[in-house]
Each structure stands twice: as C-alpha cells, then as structure tokens.
Amino acid sequence: MAAPSPGYSITLRVDTAVGQASSSDLVAAVAATGAVVTALDVVESTPKSVEIDVSADTRDVAHAEEVASELSKLSGVEVKKVSDRTFLLHLGGKLESTPKVPLRNRDDLSRAYTPGVARVCRAIAENKADARRLTIKRNTVAVVTDGTAVLGLGDIGPEAAMPVMEGKAVLFKQFAGVDAWPVALDTKDTEEIIAICKAIAPAYGGINLEDISAPRCFEIERRLRDELDIPVFHDDQHGTGIVTLAALKNALKVVNKKIEDVRIVVSGVGAAGNAIIQLLQVAGAKHIVACGRDGAIGPNSNVNTEQKKWLQENTNPEGFEGSLKEAMVGADVFVGVSAPNVLDGDDIKAMNKDALVFAMANPDPEVDPAEALKYAAVVATGRSDYPNQINNVLAFPGIFRGLLDAEATDINEDIMVAAADAIASCIPEEDLHPGYVVPSVFDPEVATKVAAAVKAVSSSS
C-alpha cells in the first residue's frame, strides 16, 4: 500500500461543538485511517463552537474522502469543507513575470523603452552576439514540451503538461537563479517541433526539452543540437543519466566495487534508459545488459529502432538472452527506468553480494524498496519519501546555470560526466553510507558545484 504523501495533502475545516470532540479526538480519528496529521489550526472560537482546520497527508483521493467521512462520524463534528492543498497551490499557475528595472518616472521610461531602447536594438542588429549581454537571453531557458510523455501519465496533451512545465521553471529559478519559461506545443510533428524551436531560439540561451515521447525525442534533440548555436538538453534522458551516474559512483564506494568490473542490468530502453547506458559507458562501465518488455536485447533480438540497434551493437558483450528476471541472477547493479513491480525480493536475492538497486519508476518503483533492502546493500528510488532519491533537480538547474554563464553553444558527454562528479562530490567520502549516496535536492552546494564544473568544462571546450 502506498504511503501518505504531501502530493495528496488536504485541509478539512471542521466545526466542533464545545464539550463534544476535542482536538485530540480529531487527530485520533484522522490517524486511525492511516493519514498523517501535519497541522491543526483554530480558525475561530465562540462560546458554543470551535472552528478548526485539520491538515493531513493522505494516500490518494479515496483516502482523503475516507478521512472526511471518519471525522463526520464524531459526535458534535461537522466537516464544512475539504480543500485539496495541491490544487490550491496551482490556482492561477506557479509563475509570474516581474521587471528587473524601476519605472519611477519619464526618465526611466525613456531608457527602458522609447526612445532609448532603439539604441540598444541597433547595437544588437550590428552584432547579434550582444543579445546575450543586453537581453534576457543571457539567463533564460525555454522548457519545451508537446505533452506526450508526462511523468507517469503518458500522452496527456500540452495543456495538461503545463503544471509540470511551470514546476520545472520554478525549480530552475529556486535552485540556480535561471529564468525559465514553459513552451507547450500543440503538435506532435517532429519537423514542426524542430522548426518552432529554431524560430524561438533568438530569445533563449538554452532549450530544455521535456516530456516528449521516444523515439521522436532522439531526432528532435539531435537535429536541434546540430542546427542551433545554443545548448539543447533533453532532461528526461541526460538529467536522469547524470544523477544516476552520480549515485552509482558513490554507491560503488560504499560497497568497494569498480564501475568497470560490475555487471549492470538496466530495465527500460526508452529515452532515459538509453541515456543512462551511454553515460555509464563513458564513465567506464563495460558489462551492461539492457532489458525491454521482451527481455534482454541480445545479438538475436528483433530491434526496430535506431536506439535499440545501438544497444544491440554496444551492450551485452556476453550475448545474454533471457528475461529481466533471468538477467538479474548474478548482477551487481540494477537500474530501473521502466514500470512498477516488475521484480520482487527473490530477484534481488539472486543478485551478487552487496548489490545496488536503483528502482526509479514513479510513483511505484520496479521493486518494493522494503523488499529490496532485505538483500541489497544500497537501494535508491525516484521518490522523495525514501532515502537516496535520484532526482533530476540535482542536475538541470546547475547544468544550465553553468552553460549560460559560459555562454555555451552546445553540451557534450564531458560536461555531463563533470556534472555527475560534482553531484557525487557533495557528499564527503567519510559521510557515505548505504542510506546516503545521493545528496539532498535542498543542499545549497549542489547547484553551485554543478554550475562551476559545467562552466569550467564548457569554457575549455
């Protein structure tokens, strides 16, 4: 059963008759459902009644309804309103545009706008490179999506993808001071997406491709990198790969193994799986078996995309053929970017001693973390309610901060490895342990170290 989550946080406004249910009765009733009470606030008190806001984390919508029902059963209690705190947070969106310069009088207006602005326009017309110095381009990233591969929701369309894109932009600003803006496109046509990105590029210092389904995302990223003079980064691929590599570097230190020696099984051969495998190989991994829905991709597998053909030619040197569960026998590392509950505790038990398990499917991992911990030395997931969260927030804000500061025109594997090393270095070796191989997304050092490493490599390229 899923644990209560802040993602399903509710506030119940209840009216209690004086002398009937106490605040402790309210807390007990909510806790009895398995919800977690996070706050209790008295809104109004009269001689006859007390109005109280009870906030709690629940598992899902049905659980929230159960909590409200249980409170209503208490004598003298009326549930007047139930508010979903997640929806309240999104009312009106999560972003706004604010000016950086004052407009106090006519002189300010003359410099910020006409007539003074014309001089700046002429300067950029004479030297387009000045756009990075004299416009928002120097600090602005476009977060581009078509809404076809949103989180674990799939193809939900550009409008429904907007809350995620807004969230991404908030993270850019919060963690690295980068101004990002959602660009949700009402098209799935590869050529049209490429053309739109090229057309809007003059306003941006970088493009972050987000939640675009495979295999189109590969072609879109490749073409834009070739045809634009600003860095293009597909976070679902490379952000995941960078943080996975960082976590693996630290986890291998915990179990005293080397990346070139371990046998790695990757479940999932889409955008994230391909990027993870390629980056792990750049970092020295030699024994990787990639598994899709039909099992391991081996020499006799029927491959139908360029990406799977690449995997067939560049992974699985032993030529293993079999299911994911069979591939797990004797493996040192499992990396999952696929689907929930494809493995169980017995599969982890069949791995080598001191196994590492990175089960990153969201919201439900490939294997129950509690079961995995019975046999694996280190377990990481994509969830915030378990230790060792492999979260792209550790990568993309600092990466773009460094790219923008270096006025970079591209991003390459050297930059990605440098970013992974920077993330890993945020935990001193003496502090590493099985429950702490990934730094917190709130660690202020992360984005700063990543940005510095990326800028250094970009400037020397």
Image: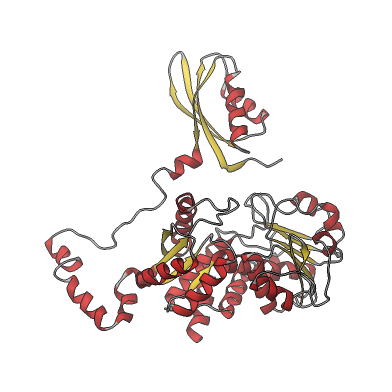
Q: Nearer the viewer, residue 211 or 348?
A: 211
User: Closer to the camera, 341 or 199?
Assistant: 199
Choose top left, top right, bottom left or bottom right for residue 257.
bottom right
Considering only vertical position in the picture, is 331 above or below 167? below
Q: Is residue 446 visible?
A: no
Q: Residue furthest left?
A: 106
Q: Residue sitting at 50 percent across and 42 percent down?
A: 86
Q: How is the image coloured?
A: secondary structure
Left or right side of 333 for 101: left
Q: Position of residue 274 (x, y in %)?
A: 65, 69
Q: Please, which residue is most extreme toward the bottom here?
A: 460
What x and y, as percent, mark residue 370? 77, 49
Judged left or right of residue 182, residue 147 is right
In terms of depth relative to the viewer, which is nearer, 455 or 253?
455
At x 35%, y 53%, the residue is 96
**What is the number of callouts on the image?**
0
**Residue 169, percent from left and from top:** 45, 58
Residue 181 left/right relative to 411: left
Q: Is residue 255 visible?
A: yes
Q: Quadrant of the N terminus?
A: top right
In the image, residue 245 above or below residue 282:
above
Residue ID at (43%, 77%): 228
The image quarter in which residue 356 lies: bottom right
| Image-based side of 59 in relation to 255, left or right | left
The image shows residue 156 at horizontal and vertical percentages of: 52, 50
Q: Residue at x 76, y 61 (%)?
A: 294
